[in-house]
Image (spheres, helix red, strand yellow):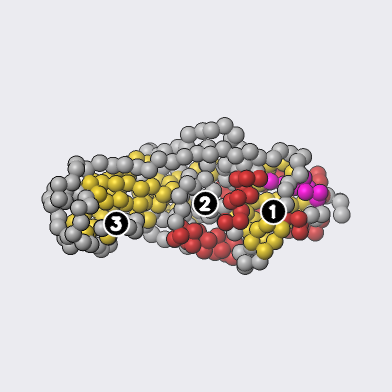
């Protein structure tokens, strides 16, 4: 099921849809030759980027998008032997993240220096790339892809590229009027909570991620609604969902995205409780069948789902009708 992050509107698609695939990756040895153990040589990783899309550079930017990261997975007889070379990226203001980012469009080739660590009949190199792509109004979640190329060492076979196939899953979800099952979550400070602690108030479950630009764009309006209605019985639980829709994640991505989430919450003055990714994603998938971000679920005082809220304007209208002049 496609997981899209679109400015202005979040779409709750229940049918299986193909996820956009705006980048075609390829990998090959940079030059002919028969390197020996200990020799340094290069392989080229190329991204062909569809018009209108851009791939973020390898530069980390505080509170920004997921940077492109290229590694040689462990367990091989090869290792990266120096800095990865690439053309200078473009730099401009990014409306998705409301800051200046570095990115590539059209195409980019990364030259990866490789060294064989030992004499081995192994002649294939696997490379893992983690990346994020966006247009000016839409972002896809960060993705991890593995590619493989053959090196002519000890009679290896001709070069080939084998991308790892992705899978999509569909999940059931509860509907308006249904009782929301109680669930546990851990907040950003490590404190455990239960959803039932918030019974007696209208609660917005805000499923978001640092790579989701419309999620971030919603924060100022959510702050306004929170200040306006909190005293009348309104609460928000931020459900940080960095790994939603991703078949593969690595420890570095989880660590980096958790740090970015905390930076955003702190820098933007968000004061409502935030659930960690590892406790939010199971709720998103198993309870609500969330397949797109932003996703906002409004729950009433009795713990029943009021609605899936598509925009902050719709949320404000609902809260005005439910809470104005009510205790």
Q: In this view of the protein, which residue sits in the foreground, 75 or 279?
A: 75
**Which residue lies under the disc numbered 1?**
183
Query: In the image, is residue 98 above or below residue 179?
Result: below
Residue at horizontal 60%, vertical 39%?
171
**Which residue lies under the disc numbered 3?**
76
Label 1 to label 3: alpha-carbon separation: 41 Å
Q: Pointer 3: residues within 10 angstroms few (<14), some, or many (20+)? A: few
Q: Earlier in the sequence, mark 3 or mark 2?
A: 3
Label 2 to label 1: alpha-carbon separation: 19 Å
Q: Answer with left or right where residue 151 lies relative to residue 195.
A: left
Residue at horizontal 26%, vertical 46%?
149
Q: Pointer 1: residues within 10 angstroms few (<14), some, or many (20+)? A: some
Residue at horizontal 52%, vertical 45%?
245
Q: Which residues are magenta?
A: 297-304
Look at the image and say whether residue 165 sits in the magenta stretch.
no
**Do the CB atoms of the residues marked 1 and 3 lie less than 8 Å apart?**
no
Q: Position of residue 151 (x, y in %)?
A: 20, 49
Q: Answer with left or right where residue 72 lies relative to residue 301.
A: left
- Which mark is on residue 243? 2
| Residue 265 position by quadrant | bottom right
Label 3 to label 2: alpha-carbon separation: 26 Å
Farthest front residue in view: 121
Q: Answer with left or right where residue 315 lies relative to residue 216.
A: right
């Amino acid at each position: 099921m496609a997981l899209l992050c679109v400015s202005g509107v979040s779409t709750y698609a229940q049918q299986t849809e193909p996820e956009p695939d705006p980048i075609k990756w390829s990998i090959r040895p940079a030059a002919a030759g028969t390197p020996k153990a200990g020799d340094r040589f290069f392989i080229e990783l190329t991204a062909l980027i569809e018009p209108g899309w851009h791939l973020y550079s390898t530069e980390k930017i505080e509170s920004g998008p997921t940077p492109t990261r290229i590694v040689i997975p462990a367990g091989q007889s090869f290792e990266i032997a120096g800095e990865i070379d690439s053309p200078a990226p473009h730099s401009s203001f990014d409306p998705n993240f409301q800051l200046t980012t570095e990115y590539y469009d059209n195409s980019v080739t990364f030259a990866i220096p490789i060294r064989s660590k030992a004499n081995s009949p192994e002649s294939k190199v696997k490379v893992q790339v983690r990346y994020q792509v966006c247009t000016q109004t839409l972002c896809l979640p960060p993705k991890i892809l593995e590619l493989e190329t053959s090196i002519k060492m000890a009679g290896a076979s001709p070069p080939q590229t084998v991308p790892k196939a992705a899978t999509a899953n569909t999940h059931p979800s509860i509907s308006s009027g249904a009782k929301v099952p109680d669930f546990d979550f851990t907040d950003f400070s490590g404190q455990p909570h239960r959803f039932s602690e918030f019974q007696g108030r209208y609660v917005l479950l805000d499923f978001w991620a640092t790579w989701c630009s419309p999620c971030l764009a919603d924060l100022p309006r959510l702050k306004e609604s929170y200040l306006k209605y909190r005293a009348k019985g309104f609460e928000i639980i931020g459900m940080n969902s960095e790994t939603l829709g991703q078949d593969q994640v690595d420890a570095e991505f989880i660590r980096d995205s958790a740090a970015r989430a905390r930076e955003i919450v702190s820098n933007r003055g968000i004061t409502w409780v935030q659930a960690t990714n590892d406790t939010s994603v199971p709720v998103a998938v198993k309870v609500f069948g969330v397949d797109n971000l932003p996703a906002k679920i409004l729950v009433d005082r009795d713990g029943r789902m009021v609605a899936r809220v598509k925009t902050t304007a719709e949320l404000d209208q609902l809260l005005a009708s439910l809470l104005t002049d009510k205790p």
